[in-house]
Amino acid sequence: MKFARFLKSVAAEMKVVTWPTAKENRRDTSTVLGTSIIMAIFLGAVDWIVQWALTFLA
């Protein structure tokens, strides 16, 4: 009984949600992808520098 009531409340709440537009989705997706690529490049560069420094010191 409680689960059925829960599902009804979820369905009612989903009707009230303001969903993002396609334009907002594209913008947010581009932001996430861009940030991920920049961080991957940055972390790769840091890894390469640390690796170079450790082999240089060894």
Image (cartoon, rainbow, N blue to C red):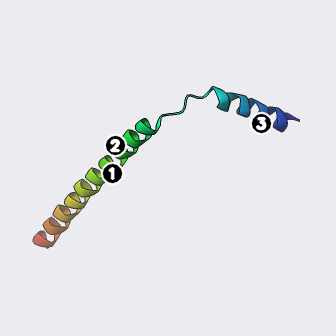
Q: Earlier in the sequence, mark 1 or mark 2?
A: 2
Between the C-alphas of marks 1 and 3, the distance is 36 Å
Residue drawn at the location 66% of the way across and 32% of the way down:
14
Q: Amino acid at mark 2?
A: Thr
Left or right: residue 42 compared with residue 6: left
Q: Position of residue 35 (x, y in %)?
A: 31, 47
Asked if residue 53 is positioned above or below residue 13 in the image, the reply reads below
- Residue 31 badge: 2
User: Which residue lies under the disc numbered 3?
Assistant: 7
Query: Quarter-wise, where is residue 54 in the image?
Result: bottom left
46 or 57, which is in the foreground? 46
Q: Amino acid at mark 1?
A: Ser
Left or right: residue 57 compared with residue 4: left
Q: Secondary structure at mark 3?
A: helix
Q: Which quadrant is the C terminus positioned in? A: bottom left
Residue drawn at the location 16% of the way across and 62% of the way down:
49
Q: Give the number of callouts.
A: 3
Q: Position of residue 31 (x, y in %)?
A: 34, 43
- Residue 36 badge: 1
Q: Secondary structure at mark 2?
A: helix
Residue drawn at the location 82% of the way across and 32% of the way down:
5
Q: Position of residue 50 (x, y in %)?
A: 19, 62
Q: Amino acid at mark 3?
A: Leu
Local packing at callout 1 (Cα closer than 10 Å; few below 14, some 14-19, many 20+) is: few
Q: Which quadrant is the N terminus positioned in? A: top right
Local packing at callout 3 (Cα closer than 10 Å; few below 14, some 14-19, many 20+) is: few
Residue drawn at the location 82% of the way across and 38% of the way down:
3
Between the C-alphas of marks 3 and 2, the distance is 34 Å
